[in-house]
Amino acid sequence: MTQSAPSGQNPEPTREALISSALHLFGRQGFDGTSTREISARAGANIAAIAYHFGGKDGLRLACGEAVAKQMAEVLQGGAKTPITNKMQAVRYLESTIEAMARFLILGAQAEDFLSFMLREINEDGPILDGVYRAMIEPKHRELCFAWGIATGSDPESEDTRLAVFSMIGQLLYFRIGKPVILRRMDWKTIGVQDAERIVNLLKRNLHAALAASNEG
Amino acid sequence: MTQSAPSGQNPEPTREALISSALHLFGRQGFDGTSTREISARAGANIAAIAYHFGGKDGLRLACGEAVAKQMAEVLQGGAKTPITNKMQAVRYLESTIEAMARFLILGAQAEDFLSFMLREINEDGPILDGVYRAMIEPKHRELCFAWGIATGSDPESEDTRLAVFSMIGQLLYFRIGKPVILRRMDWKTIGVQDAERIVNLLKRNLHAALAASNEG
DNA sequence: GTCTATAAACAGATAGAC
DNA sequence: GTCTATCTGTTTATAGAC
């Protein structure tokens, strides 16, 4: 938005190409493991373009973080259509969120770059995590806690509820984070559609089991 | 910090210091983000010592992988004392494994370097993961699957069992992997002893709930 | 807005004294 | 086995033509 769009064309083609290339390479090789030459070459642009558009390599990294936050927020939106007022709606919401996230995380091909990048940024615990946490993780987790509270009849913002939601999300995310390990142990070359379905069913069973246990306690 | 070698005592003091320093820095900054100068300075050794002892930076990385595999194997050993013959023993084994791993992962201060390093290596999916997988992850996962099979009366090496064990381990590991996110959401500065206890209890509840659900199905 | 050319700093590896 | 000094290649950033 900082520049006036040329008539009819894509406003910032090199800018977007640079972000897309950087996201891909940062995710695969890490920030320090990727050179600006490599990024610009992959984007079909010049090395100097990075300094021009983003001020430098660090600026490009930040722009990648913003792109991830924006894209992920769009993906995660869609469950919050109908308001949740009773237990059945809450359970359905939790279920459909797990399904959507699992399919996106495990199968999503275009998600690969975003996720690898974010995984590294989470470990780094820097300003990019700050942004994505505020824009996406925190609001979504709060939403899930609200639904969890309705589904189990407990305080949505209690420590136990927040931790319970993390344990639900955690097992889901691990199927993406631990993918290299899982592929070895399962003797799979990749996680196929039917494999993902099996995982989704397992996660839903675990969800219902955990909810039932919470309702008893 | 530039000390000379205390000749005659510990067989390889510089070697060990280099591995320990590298593990720390690789975990925090990544392999590419860490220079050999930084490593040798922290170890109180000379830059040339890395080439002498390990052949180069890559050799030092491999040595770090071996050190992790060795240390982790020791930590994980200890549960496989008594043979598992009945359901109660199997459940107790799963429970105590979760407890031991959770306390080690979440609280263990000296585990920090090992885990950060391995997290990056898992994402990298290279030769270091190969070694650690074979030496530690695969055998331990197999052991857990065996116990899970006894506890639920299902085939220990079926795909569903292997995935179920991963979902159990996954939620455990996420409390370490996603630590920066969790600290923000829980508004904690660090995960204290009583917080860890709360998490362990949650994980045990989830374990029992999942086992119960598996027994029904 | 994109390019070439180059500067200045830094990387890992090594030769050779001790 | 440890040191200093240095070689060689690569890094990011920038100056200036177009």
Image (cartoon, coloured by chain):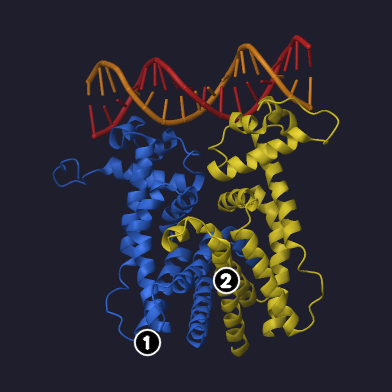
Chain colours: A blue, B yellow, C red, D orange
The spot of residue A61 in percent (x, y) is 38, 43
SS at mark 1 in the image = helix
The spot of residue A56 in percent (x, y) is 35, 34
Relative depth, front residue between A1 and A82:
A82
The spot of residue B176 in percent (x, y) is 55, 59
Are discs 1 and 2 located on one and the same chain? no
| Residue at (57% x, 49% y) in the render | B120
Residue carrying label 2 = B167
Q: Indicate whether A170 appears above or below A56.
A: below
Q: Indicate whether B147 appears above or below C14.
A: below
Please indicate, yes or no, whether residue B155 appears anywhere in the rendered image.
no
Q: What residue type is labelled 1?
A: Met
Please indicate, yes or no, whether residue A36 appears anywhere in the rendered image.
yes
Residue furthest out toward the bottom: B216
| Residue at (79% x, 35% y) in the render | B12
* Badge count: 2
| Residue at (48% x, 69% y) in the render | A163
SS at mark 2 in the image = helix
Relative depth, front residue between C16 and B42:
B42
Kindly identify which chain the residue marked by label 2 belongs to: B
A56 displayed left or right of B213: left
Relative depth, front residue between A11 and B71:
B71
- Disc 1 and disc 2: Cα gap in Å? 25 Å
Q: What residue type is labelled 2?
A: Ser
| Residue at (69% x, 72% y) in the render | B96
Kindly identify which chain the residue marked by label 1 belongs to: A
Res B105 quadrant in image: bottom right
Residue carrying label 1 = A88
Q: Indicate whether C2 appears above or below B201.
A: above
